[in-house]
Structure formats: structure tokens, C-alpha cells
Amino acid sequence: MKYAFYPGCVSRGACPELYPASVKVAETLGIEIEEVTDVGCTGAGVLSRDLSDPINARTLAKVEAMGLSSLMTICSTCQGIFTQANHRFKNEPEYRQKINTEYLAEEGLEYKGTVEVKHLLWVLMEDYGVENLKPYIKRKLTGLKVAPFYGCYIRRPTSIIAPKGLSGRKTYLEDLLDVLGAESVDSSGKSKCCGFPILTVNEENSMRMVSDHTGDAKTKGADCMVTPCPLCHLNLDANQPTAEKQAGTQIGMPIIHLPQLLGLAFGFDEKEMELQRHIVSTEAVSRQLEVSIRS
Amino acid sequence: METTFKVYRFDPENGSKPDFATYQVDLPDSATVMDGLRHIRDEQDPSLAFRASCERGSCGDCALRINKKGRLGCSLKIAKTVKNGVVTVEPIRNIPVLKDLVYDLEDFLWKKIKAVQPWITPREPEPEGEYVVAEEQLAEVRKAMSCVMCGLCDEGCAVIKIDKDFVGPAALTKAYRAVFDPRDGQHDERLTLVSEPGGVWDCTHCFEANGHCPLGLEPTDRLFEVRDEAIRQGIRSGTRNPKVQRHYDSFLNSVKRSGWLDEGRLAIESEGLTNIAGLAKLLPTVIRAIPKGKAPLPYFHHKRPGAEAIRRIIDKAQRSEV
């Protein structure tokens, strides 16, 4: 199956390690992806939906024009915004038609409502099949204690993101960690907000969320956290020192992008997965992986 | 059905610490959690305090934390929630408890609801008879009309958990009710009010509230609609938080210019080009990010293919907002 690929802004900006790690994982697994390049930012929940819906309808129309029916994301926020917008487009044909007529027609585009948008995590668990990953695992992550951190956009609103029949999406990260050989560490905030959306508006609250989540993972004994969202990564990793300062405590919790963790299990080394780019040192992860290899 | 009720007990007057008391209850399968509490009070322990009123999910009085989830006690059957024969009942979280399952809603809910002024201020002189509003004009308002102010959306709110001053989804749902009422004459003033610090922009839009509303009113969606309406009316912040407007405008202008986000410029412009203290606060994060190649160069931001088409879309959408 071939996917149109939407990498999002952050994987080419403040989290440049995410894009190549995702592409390497897709190549390793033989997942065919074609980047949809001439499209815009989803609006990330910041822009009014009056503005972002037509932009996102245009992206989905471009995917249809490529002759594809699936769009793969690597960012939970992009995923969430697309899922919500696509829900409106599919369930409100008059609304979709209005956007087609008012915004897309002049480019000769029309969104017919045929595209499914799926995060890499969903692609692996629903289309590729978790069992089919096993032959590619060159390095079991045995002994590595990983706290999954979903964030909000890939979990809610439940009625749209994880409706009946897809409620398994609530445990995909744990299921995947199990296959990779890692130990899941259950933290209470794993499906809560990381605080990134209010970083500018209310930095104090945002940093409190960071220190709560990373501190809880540390208390529960995690070696690292893994997230499918680069915005969660930005807040939990790049802003962790600020959150530590506000909380008056040292945490030092490494935050790993989901594709990086997959890449490590598929035999790529830390440098190939660009862990050295992270703000919080990932040495604890490397040490544990060395222990796993020796044993 | 034989059930063990573990009920939160606390009486500040006797100086004891909060604890759980255990009661055995045997009620028909149709019994609700509230039936169970009433049975305990009437048959076993008259000192148990709880609130209950309508018994049909219409008053919100019996909002409780039942088996670790915020629920209305009168609308939840024991058989539906019981786990391993046990039902645990506690007051909702983040709120002062007065006695047992009775808590003080004043600061948690009522002050916030009053703060959004959830009453209609007529646009025109009041008619002598009743107000007649066409049904289709009330379609939006009906999405929030049946809110019973139980506070369960606030109970589940990730921001209120850490910041008691956040106005919260319950009050913002009430604000929505007034914002979209065709009779209201304070539309823009109301939108400005909820855009002040602690208001609609402090929401993380994590959609947690939707899962906690017992009536399915989707408070996060209502909040988004209030925010989008404020943007539509050119109100991007209240009078006391200009940073919100700078952030929104910078984000929008970036997408308009290049099709995607100039993250570095967004951080700078959100603080304000002349806000030296704000810009200085960014420095430690930038200094940490530069050697890691994680600080995208601001302003030197290339256009994505398709940027012109996206700019045209935004221009057109903005024209239709006016």
C-alpha cells in the first residue's frame, strides 16, 4: 500500500531528527511513501477553523489528485487536526462542497472525501500489522523501561479518534513496546496534554505540565519516554530544563520520538537516529541498550 | 445485587482525617449509585452526607467521582459501574470538601460562571410579550442549553488541576450559550471578556472535557466555537493579554507568507519585537538548541510550493469573516 506522506512543519524545523528517522523506518519496512509537498500547515489548532479547514481540504484534495487514498502523518497534532477536519468534510457534504466551490475550484481541485489520514503509529498497528514488524527487529529493546506518552491529539476527541471498533488505539504504544521487547512504564499523564498549546499564552502552566509528566515517568522508574508527537517532544525535551528550573528539581528524562525508538530496534545506531540532537541527554537509553546487547 | 460501597468520609468538625467507610448493599439491578447512597444513609448510617435533588440527571447536584470517573450518581446504575463487586464513591477532585460527599462549588464553579456573565443583555428594548426566536436561530444555542452545571467537565480539566484560576470548560460552555444567542447585544464585549488571561486562550484544547460531560455537550467543541467566533470578529485577545494576539497574528502571517510555520520568528514575534525582557527569556532555550541544530533560523524561511494558493485561501477566508 502506498501512502501520501505529510511530515508537518516541526519535523523540518525544531525537530529535524524526526523526518529522517521516519523515512528510514518506512524504507526499512518497505512502506511506500510519497511526500505531498505543495501543501500548507494544518493550523495546529491555533488558526481558526474558518481558515484551516479550506487549507486542509486542499491538502486532502491533493492526495486524491495523486491517486492515493491514505495520508500518513508523523505528528499527533497534524493527525488530530486532519482527523477532526476530515470528519466534518465526510459527514457534512454541504460543508465540503462549499469549501470545494469557494476555495479549491479555482485551482481545479475538489476534495471528494475519500482520504483516510493515519499517523505512522496507526499505519503500523492497523495496516502493516504488528506481527509483520517482528522480522525487522534486529535489536530487542529488552530491559529498556519506556513510559509511553500519547499526548492529546492522538487520543481525543474519542468519538472521532478512537471510535467503536478502533478503541485499541488507546494502547497502541504499549502494544508496540511489547513487540519491540521494551518494558512499558505506566505514567498517569500519558494521555494528557503536554502543555505545548499554551506555551506562549501561559508558560507557567505549560512548564508545570512538563515537570509533572517527566517527573512522574522518572518516579515510576522509566529510562525514557516515547511520543508520537513532535510538539510533545519539543515541550518535554527542549523545555525540560526550563520546567526543571520552575519546579526546583532535576529530572533529566530523555524523550524519544516513536520512529527513533523503532529505528533503534531495527538496528540503526543512536547517531543514525540523531539522538545526539536532543536537549536532554539520551545516554541512559544508550547505556541500557548496551546492557541489552551484552546480555 | 450485592455490592460493597466504599464511600469517602470526612467530617472537619470531629478533626478526623479523610477515610473510606465500607458498606454492604443489596439492591435490584435497576438501582443507581444514588439509590445505594440513599440506602446506606436510611438503613445503615444516617450521618452520611451527600447532595441529591432531581434524580433524573437534570440538576447536576450529585456529581461524584465513582470508580475513579466523574459521573452523576443518579444516572449511573450500580450494575454498570461495579468492579469486582465494589463501587467506590468520592467527591469530585480539585475542590474543598465540606463533609463526606458534599463539596463547596463557590470558587470551583459558581464564581467562574458568574465571571462570564452568562445572562442575555438584550440587543433591543425588551418586547412587551414574550421573545420570539425562530427555531433555526437557536440551533447553535441548543448545543449548550441543556448544561446542568454539574462541573464534571471542570473536574476532568487538565488546566484546572494545576491552575484554579482558569475559567474552565463549564463557564465557557455557558459563555457559548450567550455568545450565540441571537437576542444578545453584548456579543463583542462578551468575546473580549472570555479572551482575557485565564479565559478561552488558556485552554490546551486537549478535548478532555468532552469525555467528562455526562450529557454529551462536547464542551471543548463549544469552547473552540467561541474562540473561532472571537477571531471572526477580529478579537484575538482580551485587553490584558496582547501576547495572544501577537502569537496568533505571527502564526497566521507565517502560513500566509510561506505556507508553513517559521517557528523561530513565531517565538520572537509572540514575545514582541520591543519586549526586551520577553526576548531575553527565550535566550537560554535558543542557546541550548543552536549546537543541536534545533533552532531554525528565523526570518530566512523559504516558501513551500503551493504557498501562493494557500495565501489566496487565507485572504478569501479572511474577507468572508469580515
Image: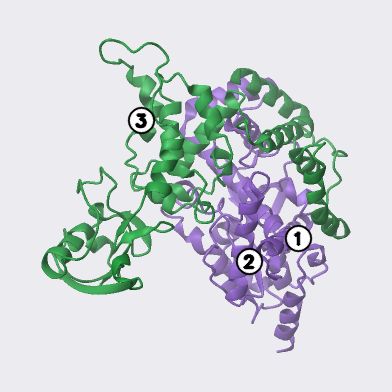
Chain colours: A purple, B green
Q: Residues within 10 Å of mark 2 (few under 14, many from 20)?
A: many
Q: Nearer the viewer, mark 3 or mark 2?
A: 2
| Residue B43 appears anywhere in the view | yes
The residue tagged with tag 3: helix, strand or loop?
helix
In x, y percent, where is residue B295? 83, 51
- For disc 1, the marked residue is A21
Q: Is residue A277 above or below residue B297?
A: below
The residue tagged with tag 1: helix, strand or loop?
helix
Q: Nearer the viewer, mark 3 or mark 1?
A: 3
Residue found at x 47% / y 31%: A92
In x, y percent, where is residue A271? 83, 68
The residue tagged with tag 2: helix, strand or loop?
helix
Q: Earlier in the sequence, mark 2 or mark 1?
A: 1
Q: Is residue A12 left or right of residue B152?
A: right
From mark 3 to mark 1, how far is it between C-alphas?
47 Å
In x, y percent, where is residue A46? 63, 39
Task: Name the image quarter holding the C terminus of chain A.
Answer: bottom right
Residue in the foreground of this view, choosing between B282 and B296: B282
State the mark number for residue B142: 3
Number of labels in the image equals 3
- For disc 2, the marked residue is A214
Residue found at x 85% / y 60%: B292
